[in-house]
Amino acid sequence: MYIFLALKLQFNFADIVQISGKTRLSVNPAQNLNAEKFLKVPGKCYTDCCGYSKIEIVRKCSEFENLEPCRVAYGMGNGVLAFRHSAERSRDCTEFLKEKLISSRRQPVQSHKDRIRACYAADSCLSSNADVFLHICREFAEEEHVLSSRGYQDFTGGKRRERVMEAILDFSSLNQTRNFIRSFKEFDGMSTYQVIGNAVRKSMENLNKQQLPLSEIYVLASLSCSAASMSAIPFQLDLQPITSRFRARVIDLAKKSREELMVSDGSSYNLIAVTYSNGPNIGLDLLLESAQLHNITVKILGWGEKNPSPAQKLKACLEFLQTLEPRVVVIFLDAFDAFFVRDASVILERFFFTKSYMVFGGENACYPLMYPYFNFGLDLCQDESYFPKIPKNKIRYINTGQWIGYATVALEVLADYMKLVGEDHAEIFPGTDQFALELMRINGAWNITLDYDARIFMVGMSYSDQEVAHMNTTVMHFNGDKPRAHRWAKRHLEQNCYHSEQEISNFPLNSVEIYETCNDLK
């Protein structure tokens, strides 16, 4: 089980970079908040085919009003579970959160029709049921934190059994929980108490196998957070009425992109690579060097952000995508453990061949629905009604560390994600954006495709080193395994560095742009 630390989120995307004196984004000219500095990119070269570029960064931030949200974090046996709740002016967070918890327990169940109606009438597409589950999750997390800090000394024997039964009954008695459990056909004929009790039992068996020192209260926290996520993006219900409609015909987008590719000289004009990094690191240097080798333009978002988070990355992508022409093809990569192995023209050809509008990398791990404290004891990962059957040796589950798509399509898919989830939930979404986008893919209201054959994206955790060595792909991503990623990146660069010095001088050394966050205004 992974516990995700939700970090400070206050993102402001009004940042620009000047390279060779050319302004890349327009800003408010009335602002005089400039902080000039120079950055050598990449920070370190690993082969003779790499060239450095001295980039001048000019930071200009627009005015904004900042209301710090309420944040609480609870340490426990295997990490920290943190929460973010939008605050109200002149309100103490402790009292505010207590009131929200009490009021959430009185909140009536929101039907799907009511949510759609509210989305149209008030432009609020958030699920009030999800908000209730988040507050219940926080309550259980706080209790687990206290138990863990005491080493569970007072949580044994009959006292423990009594509290666990009481907590299961409490969670099961919520109208939102009853409504949520009824949405699964697999639970027909079972009481809500039985379902939650079985899920807690299976979860404890799983945690014990992992040798994780956690209690049933932690399981209930995880189950309620998972219920919040699946209420925000219900994969069993029709979400078409509240999805964004593409502003441009993707057929025309594809045609124009193909035409431009045919008349181009093989440069990266049609393809823009985007990554998110708040500072220099080895993985980013290797990514930039591979981009140089394969003549690909890279945009780095979030530079200088003190406390990055999944929601921060999402907001940065949304802001950036709004600046692009709809027909531009964007490829997003993680900044620490991914790199290019083919040229832009090959990447585009393979993307066009999919006849899809947005393609994600895939992996063999059904995260996080493989765990009973996320799936309520159901084997959803092997259920073909949720994950359609695919040919043997094909990748079946999403990995969101990389994707490619038309700018307008990517913008609206990610905008719908934020619209359905909200900023509070996006920051601490259990399973992060991978769970959210998997739920959106299962729902089917969006045209989200997986790269089942790894023709564009190879996710390393699904392949052995022997398989990696023979992969015919364009991007390699070793999700989380940085040493392995760095080893394979250096190997690729060394094997493919055969250019002369004259050719090196033609590399796009100034094709890196950095969009910096203005932390001094927070």
Image (cartoon, grey):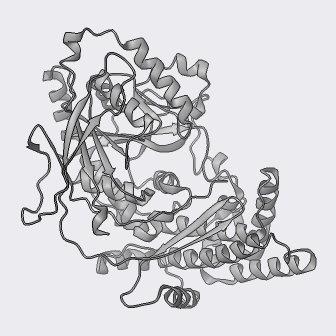
Q: Position of residue 26 (x, y in %)?
A: 11, 54
Pick the quarter of the image with the C terminus. Answer: bottom left
Q: Using the image, determine if residue 404 lies above or below residue 424.
A: above
To which quarter of the image does residue 480 belong? top right
Q: Position of residue 13 (x, y in %)?
A: 25, 59
Decide which of 51, 424 is in the foreground and name it: 51
Decide which of 166, 151 is in the foreground and name it: 151
Q: Using the image, determine if residue 62 lies above or below residue 445.
A: below
Q: Residue furthest right?
A: 157
Q: Position of residue 210 (x, y in %)?
A: 77, 50
Can the viewer see residue 278 in this picture? yes
Residue 444 relative to residue 411: left or right: right
Residue lying at 18% horizontally and 66% vertically, measured from the top left? 62
Q: Position of residue 502 (x, y in %)?
A: 19, 11
Residue 160 relative to residue 279: left or right: right
Q: Using the image, determine if residue 281 lies above or below residue 426.
A: above
Q: Using the image, determine if residue 71 lies above or below residue 80.
A: below
Residue 520 relative to residue 384: left or right: left
To which quarter of the image does residue 461 belong? top right
Can the viewer see residue 191 in this picture? no
